[in-house]
Image: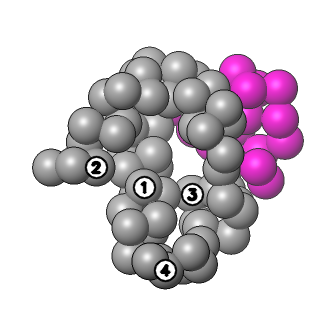
Amino acid sequence: MDKSIYSAEYQQLCQLLRRLRLEAGLTQVQVAERLGEPQSFVSKYESGERRLDVVELRYVAEAVGSTIDEVVASLDK
């Protein structure tokens, strides 16, 4: 199993989180404000430069109007 943040699976997650944000009509700044983080935090996880842990993923999913269960289910498709 490839554990790199640059794996195809992780890049798929990054793309999904970006798509969910855009579908919610949110900017990176707006998501960052909801998370209490700087905009660079959002930029880095969307580009794959920063890896999210499961707790952070849950908060990101909620910030864009989704759930961690929905995010994982979308990855399985």
Which sits in the foreground, 20 or 7?
7
Question: Mark 3: which amino acid?
Answer: Glu
Residue 75, which numbered label? 2
Identify the mark nearer the N-term, 2 or 4.
Answer: 4
Place of residue 6 in the rendered image (x, y in percent of width and height, measured from the top left): 54, 79
Place of residue 32 in the rendered image (x, y in percent of width and height, measured from the top left): 73, 34
Which residue is denoted by mark 4 in the rendering? 2
**Residue at the (42%, 22%) spot, across then down:** 67
Identify the mark nearer the N-term, 3 or 1.
Answer: 1
Question: Which residues, given as a range, are shown in magenta?
Answer: 26-41
Cα gap from disc 1 to disc 2, whole angstroms: 7 Å
Quadrant for residue 35, please give it: top right
Kindly state the secondary structure of the residue where label 4 is placed.
Answer: loop
Identify the mark nearer the N-term, 3 or 2.
Answer: 3
Query: Can residue 31 be seen?
Result: no
In the rendered view, tell whether residue 46 sits above or below residue 62. below
Mark 3 or mark 4, whichever is nearer to me: 4
**Residue at the (31%, 28%) spot, across then down:** 70
Identify the mark nearer the N-term, 1 or 4.
Answer: 4
Residue 24 in magenta stretch: no
Which residue is denoted by mark 1 in the rendering? 13
